[in-house]
Image (spheres, helix red, strand yellow):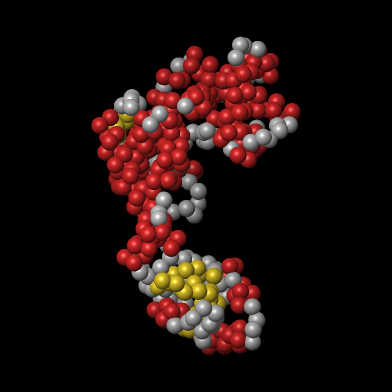
Amino acid sequence: MNSTTKAWIAAGIGILFSVGIIFWQVRASHAAPVNLSADDMSLIASDQAPQMRMRLSSDDNARREFAKNLRDLFAVADEARAKGFANRPEVKRQLDLMRSFIISQNYSTSQNAAPASDADVESFFKEPGQEDRLKQFIVDAQARNPMMKGQQIPADQMQEIRQQFGQVLIAERKGVAAGVDKQRKTQLQIMLQQARLLASMYEEESLAKSVKASQAEIDEYMKAHPEEQVHARHILIAVKSADAPTEEGLDKAAARAKAEEVLKRVKAGENFEALAKEYSTDPGSKENGGDLGWFGRGRMVPDFEKAAFALQPGQVSEIVESPFGFHIIKVEGRRNGDPQAAAQEVEQEKEKKLIDEIVKRQSSHISIAENFGVQPPPQQQMQPGLPFATQPPPAASPAPKGKSSPAKKH
């Protein structure tokens, strides 16, 4: 199946091709109660990526957060159901197709079944209503993705979509006959993917508007959280030392001499970014012309911070020594607070409050086990070089995280 066909199938069904759970954290009648036992949670966890499984297998807090995310997801999805989202004809079709796709995929995987033949697909589409179902699928896919709206599908691609769509529905039929739809893992995948679809729609059409930060809210937040920030670039000439081991480092005298040579060229009017790319030894910012982004006080080592905050936009420092070596700093801008960051903080606070209210309304019929077992993934599934943090990393400084960065070490 080529990427274009995958895009059509994904748009029409509203599901990712991996049936692993993707959490959306916003992150009338009710749906049936949601009761996820410890065994259910173990099954759900088994569908996660290897890094997540490793974390869940060893961290109680991670498992509690995992359960909370699920509770939030189901609560928002049930709120969407209560508001009538699931009763819309186009949404009903997406939910049904999502179920078909998951049963089909699980049947094909568990039975190691070969895809339906061309003859089987042609026979399937001779059944009453199946061609109309395919046409509706195309219409729904175009409605879900504006990039596809009005797009004329080439005949060869239309044939491939038709073939894939038929194979999914034929495999679903066989899966139901084999009892795949009764398997708990399949039921959980259907529940979760359908909840994800409803929650995403509800967020997009309702919650996103409710949590959008007004200018007054942004101004109020910035008053309560004032922070002076600078946007700076730097050129680092590293010094070989125990504090900043690097193969590119020079001895102290040679590093200072090199920094002074580069500073003369900056003062002579040469392009700072080009010189940073040529001479800086900071791996985190070198390729970006020495760009460190915006940062506030307390983010950089003291000598670097003092020099940066003493400059006005457009000014370049003299040589600044730090534990990493010798820096030449150029300030691109200054500001008090970050309106974009403030808006994000305001919206996150409003979002959390709204979800808490939704969870409270829906909590009477949602029960999710927090204490459950998780099998760590086989070692060969793990990707080398990816650490398994037991908690999310702290809010990152805009400064790069290379080993020669002036970002303060904690």
**Which image quadrant for residue 199?**
top left
218 vs 276, left or right, is left
Tell me the residue at 53%/16% (across/down): 173
**Which image quadrant for residue 188?**
top left
Q: Quadrant of the N terminus?
A: top right
**Which image quadrant for residue 218?**
bottom left
Nearer-the-camera pick, 111 or 84:
84
Q: How many numbered marks have been drawn onto this rendered protein structure?
A: 0
Query: Residue 168 appears at what percent x and percent y?
Result: 57, 23
Tell me the residue at 62%/18% (across/down): 132
Query: Residue 47 appears at what percent x and percent y?
Result: 44, 36
Nearer-the-camera pick, 112 or 170:
170
Q: Quadrant of the C terminus?
A: bottom left
Q: Is residue 378 visible?
A: no
Nearer-the-camera pick, 205 or 282:
205
From this viewpoint, which residue is outermost toward the front? 216
Tell me the residue at 43%/65% (across/down): 338
- Residue 357's place in the image compared with 339, above or below, is above
Query: Residue 406 appears at what percent x and percent y?
Result: 46, 73
Query: Residue 53 appears at what percent x and percent y?
Result: 40, 42
- Residue 241's place in the image compared with 268, above or below, is above
From this viewpoint, which residue is outermost toward the right? 155
Q: Is residue 349 visible?
A: yes
Tell me the residue at 63%/40% (across/down): 147
Nearer-the-camera pick, 48 or 228:
228
From this viewpoint, which residue is outermost toward the left? 364
